[in-house]
Amino acid sequence: MHIHEYQAKTLFKKNNIQTPNGILIDATAQASDACNTLGGDIWVVKAQVHAGGRGKGGGVILCHSVAEVENTCDKLLGTQLITPQTDAKGLPVNQLLIEAGQNIERELYLGLLIDRQTQKITVLASTEGGMDIEKVASETPDKIIKFGIDPLGVLSTKDCAEIAKKLELNTALTKQFNTALLGLYNIFTQKDVSLIEINPLITTAENTLLALDGKIDFDDNALYRHEDILAMRDISQEDEKEMTASEWQLNYISLDGTIGCMVNGAGLAMATMDLIEHHGGSPANFLDVGGGTTAQRVAKAFELIQSEVNVKGILVNIFGGIVRCDLIAEGILQAIEKVGLNLPIVVRLEGTNAAAGLKLLDESGVNIHTEADLTKAAIKIVALSK
Ligand code: ADP
Ligand code: MG
Protein backbone atom coordinates (compact mmCIF):
# COMPACT_ATOMS: atom_id res chain seq x y z
CA MET A 1 0.00 0.00 0.00
CA HIS A 2 1.17 3.52 -0.82
CA ILE A 3 0.47 6.68 1.17
CA HIS A 4 0.67 10.37 0.32
CA GLU A 5 3.65 12.62 0.96
CA TYR A 6 1.79 14.53 3.71
CA GLN A 7 1.00 11.26 5.49
CA ALA A 8 4.60 10.09 5.22
CA LYS A 9 5.67 13.41 6.71
CA THR A 10 3.31 12.93 9.66
CA LEU A 11 5.04 9.62 10.35
CA PHE A 12 8.42 11.31 9.86
CA LYS A 13 7.62 13.94 12.51
CA LYS A 14 6.51 11.28 15.00
CA ASN A 15 9.91 9.67 14.49
CA ASN A 16 12.02 12.81 14.94
CA ILE A 17 12.64 13.39 11.24
CA GLN A 18 12.40 17.12 10.58
CA THR A 19 10.18 18.33 7.73
CA PRO A 20 9.18 21.80 6.50
CA ASN A 21 5.97 23.22 7.96
CA GLY A 22 3.03 22.42 5.76
CA ILE A 23 -0.76 22.52 5.68
CA LEU A 24 -3.05 20.20 3.74
CA ILE A 25 -5.96 21.75 1.86
CA ASP A 26 -8.67 20.44 -0.43
CA ALA A 27 -10.17 23.72 -1.64
CA THR A 28 -8.64 26.95 -2.97
CA ALA A 29 -10.64 28.91 -0.36
CA GLN A 30 -8.34 27.44 2.33
CA ALA A 31 -5.14 28.56 0.59
CA SER A 32 -4.68 32.11 1.90
CA ASP A 33 -5.28 31.03 5.52
CA ALA A 34 -2.71 28.28 5.03
CA CYS A 35 -0.14 30.77 3.68
CA ASN A 36 -0.77 33.18 6.55
CA THR A 37 -0.44 30.46 9.17
CA LEU A 38 2.81 29.25 7.61
CA GLY A 39 4.18 32.78 7.28
CA GLY A 40 7.13 33.68 5.08
CA ASP A 41 6.91 34.85 1.49
CA ILE A 42 7.63 31.73 -0.55
CA TRP A 43 5.32 28.74 -0.60
CA VAL A 44 5.35 25.50 -2.50
CA VAL A 45 2.08 23.96 -3.68
CA LYS A 46 2.40 20.18 -3.88
CA ALA A 47 -0.15 17.86 -5.50
CA GLN A 48 -0.86 14.83 -3.31
CA VAL A 49 -0.92 11.81 -5.60
CA HIS A 50 0.45 8.30 -5.23
CA ALA A 51 3.30 8.82 -7.67
CA GLY A 52 6.69 10.44 -7.81
CA GLY A 53 7.98 12.69 -10.54
CA ARG A 54 5.43 15.35 -9.57
CA GLY A 55 8.02 18.11 -9.99
CA LYS A 56 8.52 17.09 -13.62
CA GLY A 57 4.77 16.72 -14.18
CA GLY A 58 3.89 20.23 -12.98
CA GLY A 59 2.60 19.05 -9.59
CA VAL A 60 5.12 20.94 -7.42
CA ILE A 61 4.93 24.70 -7.93
CA LEU A 62 6.98 27.39 -6.21
CA CYS A 63 4.90 30.54 -5.55
CA HIS A 64 5.97 34.04 -4.49
CA SER A 65 2.60 35.48 -3.46
CA VAL A 66 -0.68 34.35 -1.92
CA ALA A 67 -2.44 35.18 -5.18
CA GLU A 68 -0.04 32.90 -7.04
CA VAL A 69 -0.70 30.12 -4.52
CA GLU A 70 -4.45 30.52 -5.01
CA ASN A 71 -4.05 30.51 -8.76
CA THR A 72 -1.98 27.35 -8.63
CA CYS A 73 -4.46 25.60 -6.31
CA ASP A 74 -7.27 26.47 -8.73
CA LYS A 75 -5.31 25.02 -11.61
CA LEU A 76 -4.35 21.79 -9.86
CA LEU A 77 -7.37 20.78 -7.78
CA GLY A 78 -9.77 18.45 -9.54
CA THR A 79 -7.35 17.61 -12.36
CA GLN A 80 -5.53 14.40 -13.25
CA LEU A 81 -1.78 14.79 -12.74
CA ILE A 82 0.39 12.98 -15.25
CA THR A 83 4.01 12.39 -14.23
CA PRO A 84 6.79 10.17 -15.62
CA GLN A 85 5.63 7.62 -13.02
CA THR A 86 1.89 7.51 -13.81
CA ASP A 87 0.09 6.08 -16.82
CA ALA A 88 -1.30 8.33 -19.55
CA LYS A 89 -4.49 8.90 -17.54
CA GLY A 90 -2.64 10.26 -14.51
CA LEU A 91 -3.93 10.39 -10.92
CA PRO A 92 -6.65 12.61 -9.43
CA VAL A 93 -5.50 15.66 -7.45
CA ASN A 94 -7.94 16.01 -4.55
CA GLN A 95 -5.58 17.44 -1.94
CA LEU A 96 -2.66 19.86 -1.96
CA LEU A 97 0.10 20.34 0.56
CA ILE A 98 1.05 23.99 0.97
CA GLU A 99 4.57 24.12 2.30
CA ALA A 100 6.94 26.81 3.45
CA GLY A 101 9.50 27.34 0.68
CA GLN A 102 12.96 26.24 1.75
CA ASN A 103 16.36 27.71 1.17
CA ILE A 104 17.96 24.63 -0.38
CA GLU A 105 21.75 24.20 -0.30
CA ARG A 106 22.12 20.55 -1.19
CA GLU A 107 19.67 17.85 -2.25
CA LEU A 108 20.58 14.40 -0.92
CA TYR A 109 18.87 11.05 -1.25
CA LEU A 110 18.16 8.70 1.65
CA GLY A 111 16.16 5.51 1.57
CA LEU A 112 15.74 2.05 3.07
CA LEU A 113 14.63 -1.09 1.29
CA ILE A 114 15.07 -4.83 1.45
CA ASP A 115 17.94 -5.89 -0.78
CA ARG A 116 16.84 -9.32 -1.98
CA GLN A 117 20.33 -10.28 -3.05
CA THR A 118 21.95 -9.75 0.36
CA GLN A 119 18.67 -10.40 2.23
CA LYS A 120 19.27 -7.34 4.36
CA ILE A 121 17.45 -4.13 5.09
CA THR A 122 19.72 -1.76 3.20
CA VAL A 123 20.35 1.95 3.49
CA LEU A 124 20.68 3.74 0.16
CA ALA A 125 22.11 7.23 0.20
CA SER A 126 23.50 9.67 -2.32
CA THR A 127 24.90 13.16 -2.54
CA GLU A 128 23.05 13.41 -5.87
CA GLY A 129 19.44 13.54 -4.62
CA GLY A 130 16.57 15.37 -6.29
CA MET A 131 14.46 14.85 -9.33
CA ASP A 132 17.02 12.82 -11.33
CA ILE A 133 17.92 10.11 -8.83
CA GLU A 134 16.74 7.35 -11.23
CA LYS A 135 19.23 8.64 -13.81
CA VAL A 136 22.00 8.76 -11.18
CA ALA A 137 21.26 5.17 -10.17
CA SER A 138 21.33 3.86 -13.74
CA GLU A 139 24.16 5.97 -15.21
CA THR A 140 26.50 6.48 -12.24
CA PRO A 141 25.67 3.69 -9.77
CA ASP A 142 28.93 4.37 -7.91
CA LYS A 143 27.29 7.55 -6.63
CA ILE A 144 24.82 5.47 -4.62
CA ILE A 145 26.09 4.53 -1.18
CA LYS A 146 24.80 1.12 0.00
CA PHE A 147 24.89 -0.06 3.58
CA GLY A 148 23.43 -3.46 4.55
CA ILE A 149 22.14 -3.75 8.11
CA ASP A 150 22.97 -6.94 9.99
CA PRO A 151 19.62 -8.75 10.40
CA LEU A 152 20.67 -9.97 13.85
CA GLY A 153 21.85 -6.55 14.95
CA VAL A 154 20.47 -3.03 14.74
CA LEU A 155 21.43 0.14 12.95
CA SER A 156 23.82 1.96 15.27
CA THR A 157 24.66 5.66 15.56
CA LYS A 158 28.15 4.72 14.45
CA ASP A 159 26.76 3.20 11.22
CA CYS A 160 24.72 6.36 10.62
CA ALA A 161 27.75 8.58 11.18
CA GLU A 162 29.74 6.51 8.69
CA ILE A 163 27.09 7.14 6.03
CA ALA A 164 26.91 10.84 6.99
CA LYS A 165 30.64 11.08 6.40
CA LYS A 166 30.26 9.70 2.89
CA LEU A 167 27.57 12.32 2.31
CA GLU A 168 30.09 14.97 3.39
CA LEU A 169 27.93 16.33 6.19
CA ASN A 170 29.41 18.60 8.86
CA THR A 171 29.15 17.86 12.60
CA ALA A 172 25.86 19.67 13.19
CA LEU A 173 24.24 18.07 10.15
CA THR A 174 25.64 14.63 11.03
CA LYS A 175 23.81 14.76 14.34
CA GLN A 176 20.54 15.56 12.58
CA PHE A 177 21.27 12.91 9.95
CA ASN A 178 21.77 10.21 12.59
CA THR A 179 18.43 11.07 14.18
CA ALA A 180 16.71 11.06 10.77
CA LEU A 181 18.15 7.73 9.67
CA LEU A 182 17.36 6.06 12.99
CA GLY A 183 13.82 7.43 12.66
CA LEU A 184 13.51 5.97 9.17
CA TYR A 185 14.81 2.63 10.38
CA ASN A 186 12.31 2.68 13.22
CA ILE A 187 9.38 3.29 10.86
CA PHE A 188 10.70 0.63 8.47
CA THR A 189 10.92 -2.08 11.11
CA GLN A 190 7.88 -1.14 13.21
CA LYS A 191 5.42 -0.68 10.35
CA ASP A 192 6.39 -3.53 8.00
CA VAL A 193 7.61 -1.18 5.31
CA SER A 194 9.02 -2.43 2.02
CA LEU A 195 10.41 0.91 0.82
CA ILE A 196 10.91 4.24 2.52
CA GLU A 197 12.47 7.20 0.78
CA ILE A 198 13.37 10.82 1.40
CA ASN A 199 14.17 12.48 -1.91
CA PRO A 200 15.35 15.09 -1.53
CA LEU A 201 16.74 15.21 1.96
CA ILE A 202 17.98 18.78 1.96
CA THR A 203 20.51 20.83 3.84
CA THR A 204 19.52 24.46 4.18
CA ALA A 205 21.40 27.72 4.45
CA GLU A 206 20.43 27.62 8.15
CA ASN A 207 22.43 24.40 8.62
CA THR A 208 19.39 22.18 9.10
CA LEU A 209 18.54 18.85 7.52
CA LEU A 210 14.94 18.50 6.28
CA ALA A 211 12.90 15.79 4.58
CA LEU A 212 11.46 17.71 1.63
CA ASP A 213 9.61 14.72 0.21
CA GLY A 214 8.49 11.37 1.60
CA LYS A 215 7.53 8.07 0.07
CA ILE A 216 6.55 4.93 1.97
CA ASP A 217 5.34 1.60 0.59
CA PHE A 218 3.93 -0.90 3.07
CA ASP A 219 3.83 -4.67 2.81
CA ASP A 220 0.16 -5.45 2.08
CA ASN A 221 0.42 -8.81 3.80
CA ALA A 222 1.20 -7.11 7.11
CA LEU A 223 -1.47 -4.42 7.00
CA TYR A 224 -3.78 -6.46 9.21
CA ARG A 225 -1.60 -5.54 12.15
CA HIS A 226 -1.35 -1.81 11.41
CA GLU A 227 -4.78 -0.23 11.71
CA ASP A 228 -3.23 3.25 11.82
CA ILE A 229 -1.59 2.66 8.43
CA LEU A 230 -4.70 1.10 6.87
CA ALA A 231 -6.65 4.19 7.93
CA MET A 232 -4.41 6.23 5.60
CA ARG A 233 -5.49 4.32 2.51
CA ASP A 234 -6.78 6.58 -0.28
CA ILE A 235 -8.72 4.48 -2.75
CA SER A 236 -9.14 7.43 -5.14
CA GLN A 237 -5.48 6.80 -6.04
CA GLU A 238 -5.94 3.12 -6.79
CA ASP A 239 -6.79 1.45 -10.08
CA GLU A 240 -10.49 0.55 -9.97
CA LYS A 241 -9.98 -2.71 -11.81
CA GLU A 242 -7.10 -3.75 -9.59
CA MET A 243 -9.31 -3.04 -6.57
CA THR A 244 -12.22 -5.15 -7.83
CA ALA A 245 -9.69 -7.86 -8.60
CA SER A 246 -8.29 -7.86 -5.09
CA GLU A 247 -11.82 -8.17 -3.67
CA TRP A 248 -12.12 -11.37 -5.73
CA GLN A 249 -8.64 -12.57 -4.75
CA LEU A 250 -7.39 -12.14 -8.28
CA ASN A 251 -3.90 -10.76 -8.85
CA TYR A 252 -4.53 -8.22 -11.57
CA ILE A 253 -2.32 -5.51 -13.00
CA SER A 254 -3.34 -3.35 -15.96
CA LEU A 255 -0.75 -2.96 -18.73
CA ASP A 256 -0.61 -1.04 -22.02
CA GLY A 257 -0.90 -3.86 -24.59
CA THR A 258 -3.84 -5.35 -26.48
CA ILE A 259 -3.99 -9.01 -25.48
CA GLY A 260 -5.90 -9.81 -22.31
CA CYS A 261 -4.43 -12.74 -20.40
CA MET A 262 -6.08 -15.05 -17.94
CA VAL A 263 -3.61 -17.42 -16.34
CA ASN A 264 -3.30 -19.42 -13.15
CA GLY A 265 -0.04 -18.96 -11.28
CA ALA A 266 2.22 -15.90 -11.30
CA GLY A 267 5.11 -17.73 -12.98
CA LEU A 268 2.92 -19.08 -15.75
CA ALA A 269 1.42 -15.61 -16.18
CA MET A 270 4.90 -14.13 -16.67
CA ALA A 271 5.86 -16.88 -19.12
CA THR A 272 2.62 -16.34 -21.05
CA MET A 273 3.26 -12.60 -21.28
CA ASP A 274 6.82 -13.27 -22.49
CA LEU A 275 5.56 -15.65 -25.14
CA ILE A 276 3.01 -13.12 -26.40
CA GLU A 277 5.78 -10.51 -26.68
CA HIS A 278 8.04 -13.05 -28.34
CA HIS A 279 5.47 -13.62 -31.07
CA GLY A 280 4.94 -9.93 -31.72
CA GLY A 281 2.02 -9.12 -29.43
CA SER A 282 1.75 -7.17 -26.19
CA PRO A 283 -0.16 -8.12 -23.04
CA ALA A 284 -2.97 -5.85 -21.78
CA ASN A 285 -2.74 -7.15 -18.26
CA PHE A 286 -1.15 -9.51 -15.82
CA LEU A 287 -3.77 -11.75 -14.28
CA ASP A 288 -3.22 -14.66 -11.95
CA VAL A 289 -6.52 -16.30 -11.04
CA GLY A 290 -4.78 -18.33 -8.35
CA GLY A 291 -4.53 -22.02 -7.56
CA GLY A 292 -7.87 -23.23 -6.21
CA THR A 293 -10.03 -20.89 -8.24
CA THR A 294 -13.81 -21.16 -8.76
CA ALA A 295 -16.01 -20.78 -11.84
CA GLN A 296 -17.35 -17.49 -10.39
CA ARG A 297 -13.88 -16.05 -9.99
CA VAL A 298 -13.01 -17.03 -13.54
CA ALA A 299 -16.18 -15.27 -14.68
CA LYS A 300 -15.19 -12.14 -12.74
CA ALA A 301 -11.68 -12.23 -14.19
CA PHE A 302 -13.14 -12.53 -17.66
CA GLU A 303 -15.38 -9.51 -17.07
CA LEU A 304 -12.40 -7.49 -15.87
CA ILE A 305 -10.36 -8.29 -18.96
CA GLN A 306 -13.24 -7.45 -21.30
CA SER A 307 -13.76 -4.10 -19.58
CA GLU A 308 -10.26 -2.93 -20.59
CA VAL A 309 -10.86 -0.70 -23.62
CA ASN A 310 -7.60 -1.53 -25.39
CA VAL A 311 -8.11 -5.32 -25.37
CA LYS A 312 -8.33 -6.79 -28.88
CA GLY A 313 -8.14 -10.47 -27.99
CA ILE A 314 -8.00 -12.82 -25.01
CA LEU A 315 -5.65 -15.67 -24.25
CA VAL A 316 -6.63 -18.06 -21.51
CA ASN A 317 -3.78 -20.27 -20.38
CA ILE A 318 -4.57 -22.65 -17.57
CA PHE A 319 -2.49 -25.43 -16.15
CA GLY A 320 -4.85 -27.62 -14.18
CA GLY A 321 -3.04 -28.80 -11.08
CA ILE A 322 -5.27 -28.17 -8.12
CA VAL A 323 -7.84 -26.45 -10.27
CA ARG A 324 -9.81 -28.57 -12.74
CA CYS A 325 -9.83 -27.45 -16.36
CA ASP A 326 -13.50 -28.34 -16.85
CA LEU A 327 -14.33 -25.93 -14.05
CA ILE A 328 -12.40 -23.17 -15.80
CA ALA A 329 -14.26 -23.94 -19.02
CA GLU A 330 -17.55 -23.63 -17.14
CA GLY A 331 -16.46 -20.28 -15.72
CA ILE A 332 -15.57 -18.96 -19.18
CA LEU A 333 -18.94 -20.05 -20.58
CA GLN A 334 -20.77 -18.52 -17.60
CA ALA A 335 -18.94 -15.24 -18.14
CA ILE A 336 -19.68 -15.19 -21.87
CA GLU A 337 -23.34 -15.81 -21.14
CA LYS A 338 -23.34 -12.89 -18.71
CA VAL A 339 -21.20 -10.26 -20.41
CA GLY A 340 -21.14 -11.49 -23.99
CA LEU A 341 -18.10 -12.03 -26.16
CA ASN A 342 -17.12 -9.59 -28.83
CA LEU A 343 -13.41 -10.40 -29.03
CA PRO A 344 -11.43 -13.31 -30.40
CA ILE A 345 -10.49 -15.76 -27.68
CA VAL A 346 -7.98 -18.59 -27.57
CA VAL A 347 -8.13 -21.05 -24.71
CA ARG A 348 -5.27 -23.35 -23.88
CA LEU A 349 -5.97 -25.94 -21.21
CA GLU A 350 -3.48 -28.48 -19.90
CA GLY A 351 -3.52 -30.80 -16.92
CA THR A 352 -6.38 -32.07 -14.76
CA ASN A 353 -9.52 -32.68 -16.84
CA ALA A 354 -8.06 -30.70 -19.78
CA ALA A 355 -9.75 -32.90 -22.38
CA ALA A 356 -13.13 -32.52 -20.67
CA GLY A 357 -12.66 -28.75 -20.49
CA LEU A 358 -11.70 -28.39 -24.14
CA LYS A 359 -14.62 -30.61 -25.16
CA LEU A 360 -17.03 -28.45 -23.15
CA LEU A 361 -15.80 -25.36 -24.97
CA ASP A 362 -15.75 -26.97 -28.40
CA GLU A 363 -19.33 -28.19 -28.00
CA SER A 364 -20.67 -24.97 -26.50
CA GLY A 365 -21.45 -23.39 -29.84
CA VAL A 366 -19.54 -20.27 -28.74
CA ASN A 367 -16.79 -19.03 -31.04
CA ILE A 368 -13.78 -20.09 -28.98
CA HIS A 369 -10.46 -21.25 -30.42
CA THR A 370 -9.13 -24.09 -28.30
CA GLU A 371 -5.49 -25.14 -28.26
CA ALA A 372 -3.53 -27.72 -26.30
CA ASP A 373 -0.13 -26.27 -27.20
CA LEU A 374 0.92 -22.97 -25.58
CA THR A 375 3.18 -21.68 -28.39
CA LYS A 376 0.46 -22.32 -30.97
CA ALA A 377 -2.05 -20.60 -28.72
CA ALA A 378 0.17 -17.51 -28.39
CA ILE A 379 0.79 -17.30 -32.14
CA LYS A 380 -2.92 -17.66 -32.82
CA ILE A 381 -4.05 -14.91 -30.41
CA VAL A 382 -1.39 -12.51 -31.70
CA ALA A 383 -2.66 -13.09 -35.26
CA LEU A 384 -6.35 -12.83 -34.28
CA SER A 385 -5.90 -9.60 -32.34
CA LYS A 386 -4.07 -7.74 -35.10
P1 ADP B 1 8.63 14.74 -6.68
O1 ADP B 1 9.72 13.85 -6.17
O2 ADP B 1 7.32 14.02 -6.79
O3 ADP B 1 9.01 15.45 -7.94
P2 ADP B 1 9.32 16.57 -4.50
O4 ADP B 1 8.54 16.76 -3.26
O5 ADP B 1 10.59 15.82 -4.38
O6 ADP B 1 8.35 15.90 -5.59
O7 ADP B 1 9.60 17.99 -5.13
C1 ADP B 1 10.34 18.18 -6.32
C2 ADP B 1 11.36 19.29 -6.14
O8 ADP B 1 10.71 20.49 -5.75
C3 ADP B 1 12.38 19.00 -5.04
O9 ADP B 1 13.46 18.28 -5.53
C4 ADP B 1 12.75 20.40 -4.60
O10 ADP B 1 13.78 20.91 -5.44
C5 ADP B 1 11.49 21.23 -4.84
N1 ADP B 1 10.73 21.40 -3.56
C6 ADP B 1 9.83 20.55 -3.03
N2 ADP B 1 9.36 21.01 -1.86
C7 ADP B 1 9.96 22.18 -1.63
C8 ADP B 1 9.91 23.17 -0.57
N3 ADP B 1 9.13 23.01 0.49
N4 ADP B 1 10.71 24.25 -0.70
C9 ADP B 1 11.52 24.42 -1.77
N5 ADP B 1 11.59 23.56 -2.78
C10 ADP B 1 10.84 22.45 -2.73
MG1 MG C 1 10.86 13.72 -4.57
Image: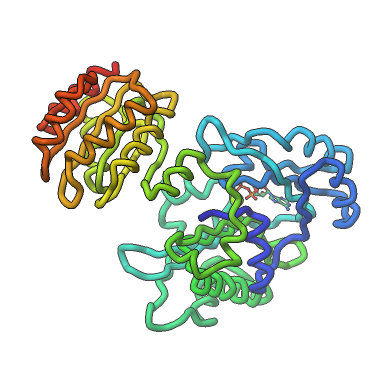
Q: Is residue 148 above or below residue 99?
A: below
Which quadrant: the C terminus? top left
Q: Nearer the viewer, residue 290 or 116?
A: 290
Q: Position of residue 307 (x, y in %)?
A: 43, 28
Quadrant hosting residue 252: top left
Query: Which corner quadrant of the image does residue 202 belong to?
Result: bottom right
Looking at the image, which residue is at 68% across and 44% down? 47
From the viewer's perspective, is 72 left or right of 277?
right
Question: Where does residue 243 sit, x and y in percent of width and height?
Answer: 48, 45
The residue lying toward the viewer, choosing from 355 and 45, is 355
Residue at 32% x, 20% y is 343
| Residue 139 spot, x, y in % from top left | 42, 46
User: Viewed as shown, does residue 32 lie left or right of 172?
Assistant: right
Q: Is residue 139 visible?
A: no
State the colouring used for the structure image. rainbow
Q: Is residue 157 above or below residue 102?
A: below
Is 332 on the left or on the right of 304, as rendered? Answer: left
- Total of numbered circles in the picture? 0
- Viewer can see residue 341: yes
For the point 52% across and 59% down, which residue is it?
A: 126
- Across and down, in percent, residue 281 comes to 28, 25
The residue lying toward the viewer, choosing from 162 and 112, is: 112
Residue 245 sits in which quadrant?
A: top left
Rendered residue at 11%/36% (across/down)? 356
Q: Decide which of 80, 141 is in the foreground and name it.
A: 80
